[in-house]
Amino acid sequence: MKNLRLLLPLIWLTFFVASCNDDTKGPSDIPVGEFEKGVLIMNEGAFGVNDGEVFHYDPSTGVIKEDIFRTKNSRPFGGLIEDMVEAEGRMYLVANTGKVEIVNPKDFSLLGGISLGLNITRSLVSVNQKLFISDWGPYDAGFNNPDSYVAVVNDLNGGPIAKKIAVSSRPEGMIVVGNFIYVACTAAKKYDVISIASETLAASVAVEGNPTQFLEIEGRLFLYAQDENNAIFHEINPGNYALVRTVKIPLANPTPIVTLGEGSELFIVTSTGFPDYTDAVAKVSVNTGQVINGSFFTGSGLYGIGFKIEGKEIYVAENNGFQGKGSVSILSTTGQKVRTLSVGKGPSGFIFK
């Protein structure tokens, strides 16, 4: 199942303030790009077909625009979209098939890309006008990934890989805090710490469970991990990258699919996996270490989740067995379905604008 990233660092809002003076131009006078409002829906695509795409949904009109990358650039994306990151005035579409496409977030016109030297690309952060890209590296004969790395690109618009920083096996989500880049390494059960100044590995810390992404919860840095019976939140001291404490919330079959709600509350997708795929959305609290509601929403093939702060709506993506289009259920704060959207194949993530 798709490891959904750090959606918290990737979900941003844009506020437009109207000018009170007709003679003074303010932000409301600046033309708004076609995709600067609404919801971007990341559709991973189907394995072997590499037909990932991005849809745009306007909640105010109910209009969905399909395949916006293809429409703007007159060619298909041509990969499985693993992550979608907005940073430095750019949108980065990260394909786990070994490439990154870089577009203008206003209209999705192509700005650049990275397609050489990557293997199984997972996520991306930007700092100091550079890109740092987590990559599992190649498989060995036993389908392990002993040569995982974080690739460094010295241009925000892409280009060649300047260096590769070796990290623990299967790096996933990352976050920049202070002078360091934190990397969740799921197979190794560690978080690695990269010094931004030297672009070298500064530390590697073992943790319980399989970590996948970092979350900022009420001003504190947490690493989310899972085992078969627990959702695990490791609090990290960003000043010295030490592990402060671990909060284990008893929860059967948690997946890496998680999003922040309000305060210390989070929504986590659970799944029994093959063959039944009896899935649910659980609501939990990190502060209390308890499950608030283990079946906030139930379904099958739940594949992504996001929390829209404006309106306090929960978006739940369903892959529908990858048989044609997927769907998105929009839920109220009580878990009631208020509408359903027909979207692309394998919907797995959202950016709320």
Image (cartoon, grey):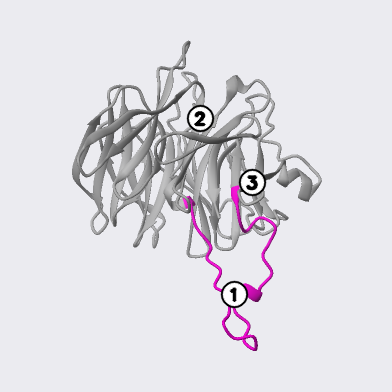
**Label of residue 303 in the image:** 2
Query: Where in the figure is residue 173, as x and y percent of width and height?
Result: 43, 43
Q: Mark 1 and mark 3: span between their CA atoms?
A: 23 Å
Which element is circle 3 on? strand
Residue situated in front as seen by the camera: 272 or 316: 316
Q: Earlier in the sequence, mark 2 or mark 3?
A: 3
Give yes or no for residue 18 being in the magenta stretch: yes
Above or below — where is 80 with respect to 104? Answer: above
Query: Where in the figure is residue 140, as x and y percent of width and height?
Result: 49, 24
**Label of residue 27 in the image:** 1
Query: Where in the figure is residue 160, as x and y percent of width and height?
Result: 62, 52
Q: Quadrant of the C terminus?
A: bottom right
The magenta-colored residue range is 10-39
Tell me what residue is drawn at x 47 percent, y 50 percent: 311
Q: Hey, what amino acid is under mark 1? A: Pro
Query: Where in the figure is residue 232, as x and y percent of width and height?
Result: 27, 35
Q: Is 43 on the left or on the right of 124, as rendered?
A: right
Q: Hey, what amino acid is under mark 2? A: Tyr
Residue situated in front as seen by the camera: 14 or 23: 23
Q: Hey, what amino acid is under mark 3? A: Tyr
Say which residue label 3 marks: 57
Give yes or no for residue 85 being in the magenta stretch: no
Q: Residues within 10 Å of mark 2 (few under 14, many from 20)?
A: many
